[in-house]
Image (spheres, coloured by chain):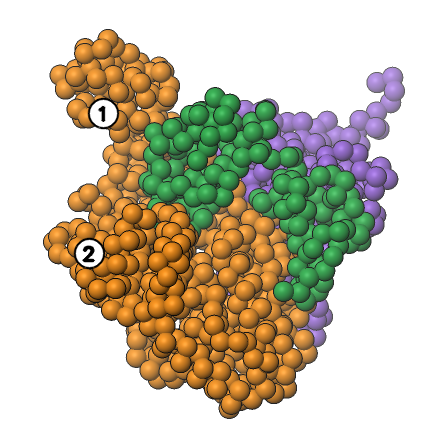
Amino acid sequence: MVNMILNGLDISVEEGTTLLEAAKFYGIDIPTLCYDETLSPYGACRLCLVEVGEPGKAKLFSACTYPVREGLIVKTNTKRVIDARKMIIELYLASCPSSKKIQDLASEYGVTEVRFTPKNDECILCGLCVRVCEEQMQAKAIGFIDRGVNRYISTPFERQSEDCRLCGACMYICPVCQARCQGPREEETICNACLNISPPCLEKYDEAMCYMDPCVACELEKEPDE
Amino acid sequence: MAPLPVKFKTKEDFLSFKQRSIEQYEKNRCYLAVCGDTGCSVQGSKNLYDQLEIYLRKQGYTENVKLKCTGCLGLCENGPLVIVYPQEIFYQRVEPEDIEEIIEKTVIQGEIIERLLYSDPVSGEKYIYGRELPFYKSQLRNLLEANWKIDPGSIEDYIANGGYAALVNAVTEMDPGAVVEEIKKSQLRGRGGAGFYTWVKWEECRQQTGRKFIICNADEGDPGAFMDRSLMEGNPHSVLEGLIIGGYATGAQEGIVYIRAEYPSAVEKLKLAIDRAEDLGLVGENILGSDFNFQVYLSIGAGAFICGETSALIASVDGRIGEPVQKPPRLVQNGYLGRPTVVNNVESLANVPLILRDGAQKYCRVGTEKSSGTKIFSLVGKVNNTGLVEVPLGITLREIIYDIGGGIKEGKQFKAVQTGGPSGGCIPASSLDLPTDFDQLSSAGSMIGSGGMIVMDDETCMVDIARYFLQFLADESCGCCFTCREGISRLLEIVKEISDGSAKPGQLELLKELAGVVKDSTMCGLGQTAPNPVLSTLRHFEEEYRAHIEQKHCPAGVCRELITYSIDQKLCNGCGLCLKNCPAGAVTGNKKEPHYILYDKCDKCGVCTTVCRAEAVIKQ
Amino acid sequence: MKKAIVLGFEVPRGPDGVSIVALLQAIQDKYNYLPEKFLRRAAREMEVPLIDVYSVAKFYKSFSLVPEGRHQIVTCTGTACHVRGSEKITEEISRTLGVEVNSTSPDGEYSLKCVNCVGACASAPLVIVDGEYHGNMTPLKAGKLFAQGAKGKTAVS
């Protein structure tokens, strides 16, 4: 076991785990976009940033890729961390407003303004699809192509890959494809709808079934003739 | 050339070979050193060398007058350079037409040819001997000195001038711990950018067991920096010797030189050097009869700036895309092939033989307390004496730019000097008296980096410079981290808006805020330093940014959308040169009558300004 | 240097054998681009997924997946070249020859590329034509250098 300090708490965690896993184990929520517990960590989305090190000398690292070590001092919710996350979320919103996951994060972090020119990129290059294809499906049909601002994900020679079995895992795991936010229009980028309204089914079930409006659960409950 | 012996088995084998090499070297005291470095070859030194060879052969002088194609001699501005030995007469801007005169007059009769001498651009004084030039006088050329004396292709030349003695001594007389100790005493810091103590890396690697690697990072990607190239082209054995010593000290039996493909000549020189060292048994099994084995491999980069970052470099050596990985675990625990790996810069390694040869104590006498030794800078841009300069760490920027560099071109005003490449920043005139050491430059918002020093005058726009570096980084980032990829792209977007005058008030604050986050939250060194060019220009030249935003005016007259060209109707004599040369067809007018520029056609290339003899083109 | 023969190409060997990058460099050197069939063969021979080979080929700047022009024109865009006006020179060449930056002219005659510093900053700005360096360029000189070439004669340099 490794002893370290997490948000002021003395904790001990198993060796070989990451800061993200340790934080999760102790019930501390760290947002992620490129992390999936069944896949190897990639550290690309930068949302899981935490402050590591002595006060004054601390630096930000992605929690998903940082292995726990004896004596580490880690803080997950400092102003520096939250400010960085807010800016990152704002950047995400500006480039990919159609992802419900990103819109939810924006609501959670109170990001109410986007100061960048909106783009409607579909892909945030989190690489979940590339990893699920390689690690879970053993196919390796897709990968990162080109570099820098021109980077994208594709198949060899941009054609249907012989290695692809059309399993659909890449779409299933995609944080943009899996749930679309219908709210924002191109010029607006911020929806802030789902999380900000009171869930419609709260009165009926005494528990929120979903955050969609109209509520999917309520819609399903409806009698056909209603 | 002395016949190559079989591999050295003992120190005595080496010493007797050294003796023979020295005799051979002394015998050929009368020679011409022609700079064969890329800088001079651009100016025609290759052809000059060939012509000299033909002339010497034709006249039958080959026995007595030797010819050496050397590495960079330093003063690239005045190339091609030729130095006549043994007197060391320094000729500059030599043309093939000068050959006969040089041989017949200077070499044979010892006469000086006035017109080929260097004359100071300010005082007009002429100098006969290289070392008397102000350019060289203020330098301390510990590493570059050898470039004047040796043929980079000849291991005999290198050995005759003291080369490989440090390696031989280390392997036969010292244990690896003692070598690391000596490097520790020398306080040598990495010359690649970060200034990390070399001994710390070496000691950590020495403590590790099993298969280890030492890598020489010759992926000199910073634009405007070419000292590593010149070291490898001019004195490849010094780098190789440093690498082998590094291998001995750290216990790595395999060394890799990762060199960028844009340096074809350096690749050739290094290949040859490795082959030669292998021939003599300085690389291979049981070096000098000891149980130290060391193999050297060459890995050629395929064009990616990010591969200068050590973990990306290792990915590239391994044949993967150059994507950095987060440290920890550090490379010294988990590097190439998952084994302990040390990565050192070219210039750091070239310092190692010097330290062992002269002793750490002597080495420490040069430089400052925390930055010992010398540093090579490539002094380029709008400065009179562009070239390669080597100075003790700690001398001021003013000394480098004015005493050595001879001041600003065409008597213009100094504005800033850019150091540290895309990770560095711009240092303004008010900080010219800053000493150049690792810590002081960082405090001014820049860094020594690999040693590129680009001097800028008042015709350089700082917004444009920030835009340039961001564009560079947008293309060169690997694209993995969101904050680096998207952050740089957004920074660039804002800077472009500022430079074309479409920026809204408040953009400057957003620029600062975003730059801070990119710096703080990205994984590797490229991303963490990417905002530096913006932050440092903002810090020292915020007024210039504001002028772009508020007055829609580019004070340096660079940002195209904010300038217009017009023709002064009184000064124009209607010669038609601008009309003839304008690539956009934007000039109109009758011959012998004042011309006009059609604003909607003009794409502001500025050709009209350069061709106009009447200075009638006005840029506003 | 230690070498190995892979797919008929002579490739330098590293501590871990031949790397994909080294093999692709050998192919690029011979054909001036990376033909698809060789990338497929390389993947099979080296036993790596095709996507990894393709990814490497697209990541590094010195590789090209389409045949390059008979004449290679490279303008240096290092910092020293930039402050001495390399941008305008690139534009001028692009205009004279009718080639976009980082592409090849339709007749396959010229490829125009930008590189980040060739390390000959003293002679900035630089243009390299088929491996030959031309220093201290101006838009005017650059235009003249290629003026004849554009008319169909390959009179560059």
Query: Element at badge 1?
Result: loop
On the image, the x and y values in percent for residue B169 come to 48, 86
Amino acid found under the numbered disc labelled 1:
Cys
Q: Nearer the viewer, residue A156 or C45?
A: C45
Labelled disc at residue B113: 2
Chain in purple?
A
The quarter in which the C terminus of chain B is drawn is top left
Q: Would residue C14 appear left or right of B491 to someone viewing this image?
A: right
Q: Nearer the viewer, residue B225 or C137?
A: C137
The image quarter containing residue A125 is top right
Q: Amino acid at mark 2?
A: Ile
What colour is chain B? Answer: orange
Which color is chain C depicted in? Answer: green
> Is B447 rendered above or below residue B600?
below
Determine the residue positioned at 74% across, 57% down: C5
Q: Position of residue B277 (x, y in %)?
A: 55, 73
Q: Compare marks 1 and 2 and give the one earlier in the sequence.
A: 2
Q: Which residue is mark 1?
A: B612
Q: Secondary structure at mark 2?
A: loop
Whether residue A70 is visible, yes or no, is: no
Q: Is residue B144 left or right of residue B525?
A: left
